[in-house]
Amino acid sequence: DGICGGFDQPIGVKLVTSIVSVVPKEIGVFVSTETEYWTAGTEPATLLFTGVSTALVVGAPKEAILPFRSATMKSKVDVGAVSPKQQDSPPSYEMSFRIKPNQALLYRLSGDYNAIHVDSDLAEMAMGNHNRNDRGEAKGMSRPVLHGLCSLAFAVRGVLRFVRQREAEHFDVTYLSCQFVRPVYVGDQIKVCVWDDDATRTSTMRK
């Protein structure tokens, strides 16, 4: 008694994972999995949340892989997308970050050891045109790609800081979704813009 202090008591969780997409590219194959987190030991079981993860299998021959996308993929909600109305209006809050040279190295402690986050040459191969200008020229020196979830964390930090400035009472993050439209590189200067419509807070990152 008292071990958990003011925290909720621990619960059992059952994970159900399935492959939802296979996308062959020149560098290798991107394999996405969808994991459902269910309560265990209770009837009926309750779905807590669903997580999607994508892994790059470097070197797998593109011509030998059959593309696949599951028709039952559940994670299609797009609540976090910035609407045209929000993009045309000034953001409610802005903050800037410089991605530190060791940021991707630190995030490897999360367990994601994909080489594109430390190997500049491999990152350039993986990103292709994302790291080139309109004339097809490389945008300066090649740099490692920041982990997607680390990029997301900067956007969420902007939302949390905005909410803390406006609301003194306790608040909870009850839903979070995102779209990764462009890679963030180590050394980038990024700006997090937050729009507030009282019901939802939406943020986007610009370079």
Image (cartoon, grey):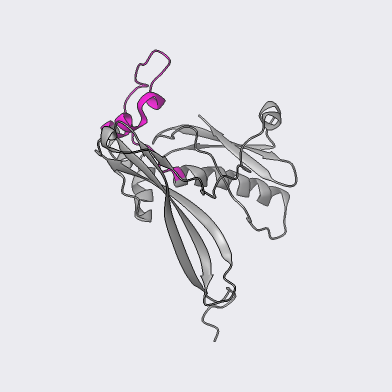
Extreme residue toward the right, this view: 198
Q: Residue furthest top?
A: 135
Asked if the stretch drawn in magenta spans residue 140, the answer is: yes
Q: From what the image shows, is residue 20 above or below residue 23? A: below
> In the depicted view, which residue is nearer to us: 20 or 124?
20
Q: Please tell me whether residue 4 is drawn above or below residue 14 in the rendered image.
A: below
Is 75 located above or below residue 193 in the figure? below
Give 81 or 30, whichever is nearer the viewer.
Answer: 30
Q: Which residues are magenta?
A: 121-148
Q: Residue at x 38, y 55 (%)?
A: 110
Magenta stretch: residue 139 in it?
Answer: yes
Residue occupying the point 51% across, 81% down: 3
User: In what quadrant of the picture does the N terminus appear?
Assistant: bottom right
- x%, y% of residue 89? 71, 29
In this rendering, the count of numbered labels is 0
What percent of the width, then of the height, locates residue 55? Answer: 36, 46
Residue at coordinates 34% horizontally, 38% vertically from top-left? 66
x%, y% of residue 54? 40, 46
> Is residue 57 left or right of 186 when viewed as pictured?
left
Pinpoint residue 170: horizontal percent, then vertical percent.
Answer: 69, 60
Tell whether 184 sits left or right of 46: left
Which quadrant of the view contains residue 57? top left
For this rendering, which residue is in front, 36 or 83? Answer: 36
Q: Is 143 above or below relative to 77?
A: above
Q: What residue do we see at 66% from left, 29% from top? A: 87
